[in-house]
């Protein structure tokens, strides 16, 4: 798991929001509306779930969301595990 400050989370959220907006996947006006949370709500970022690489936002309340703003399984055992 990666620990960084809210400004970094904000930038990552903005990047993915802009991409989804450009692809027509959302009509949300802001990244907060799109994701349903703010960068200050993010406790950690994961970069893999099982064998799937990606960006997963873990909130302080334990919920996890992917870059498509879809809620994911919150079980920490799924995230950032080495696979051999």
Image (cartoon, rainbow, N blue to C red):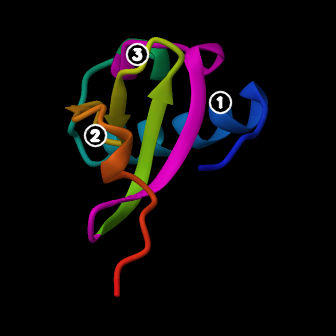
**Looking at the image, which residue is at 28% across and 40% down?**
68
Judging by the rendered image, the residue that carries numbered circle 3 is 29
N-terminal of the pair, mark 3 or mark 2, is 3
Residue 33 position in % (x across, y down): 39, 12
**Looking at the image, which residue is at 49% across and 49% down?**
46
The magenta stretch spans residue 47: yes
Per the rendering, the mark at residue 10 is: 1
Residue 45 position in % (x across, y down): 55, 42
Residues tagged 1 and 3 counted as in contact (Cβ below 8 A): no
**Looking at the image, which residue is at 27% across and 71% down?**
51
Residue 47 position in % (x across, y down): 48, 58
Q: Is residue 68 above or below residue 39?
A: below
User: Counting other residues with Cα less than 10 Å from the Cα at mark 2, is it few (<14), some (14-19), or many (20 or more)?
Assistant: some
Which type of secondary structure does the marked residue at label 1 adopt? helix
Q: Nearer the viewer, residue 30 or 11?
A: 11
Judging by the rendered image, the residue that carries numbered circle 2 is 68
Image quadrant in which the C terminus is located: bottom left
Is residue 24 visible in the rendered structure shown here? yes
User: Counting other residues with Cα less than 10 Å from the Cα at mark 1, is it few (<14), some (14-19), or many (20 or more)?
Assistant: some
What residue range appears in magenta? Answer: 34-51
Residue 56 position in % (x across, y down): 42, 44
Which type of secondary structure does the marked residue at label 3 adopt? loop
Q: Quadrant of residue 75?
A: top left
Q: Quadrant of residue 42?
A: top right
């Amino acid at each position: 798991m990666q620990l960084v400050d809210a400004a970094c989370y904000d930038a990552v959220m903005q990047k993915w929001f802009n991409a989804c907006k450009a692809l027509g996947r959302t009509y949300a006006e802001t990244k907060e509306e799109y994701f349903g949370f703010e960068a200050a709500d993010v406790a950690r970022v994961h970069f893999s779930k099982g064998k799937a690489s990606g960006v997963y936002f873990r909130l302080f309340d334990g919920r996890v969301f992917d870059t498509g703003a879809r809620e994911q399984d919150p079980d920490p055992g799924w995230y950032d595990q080495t696979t051999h």
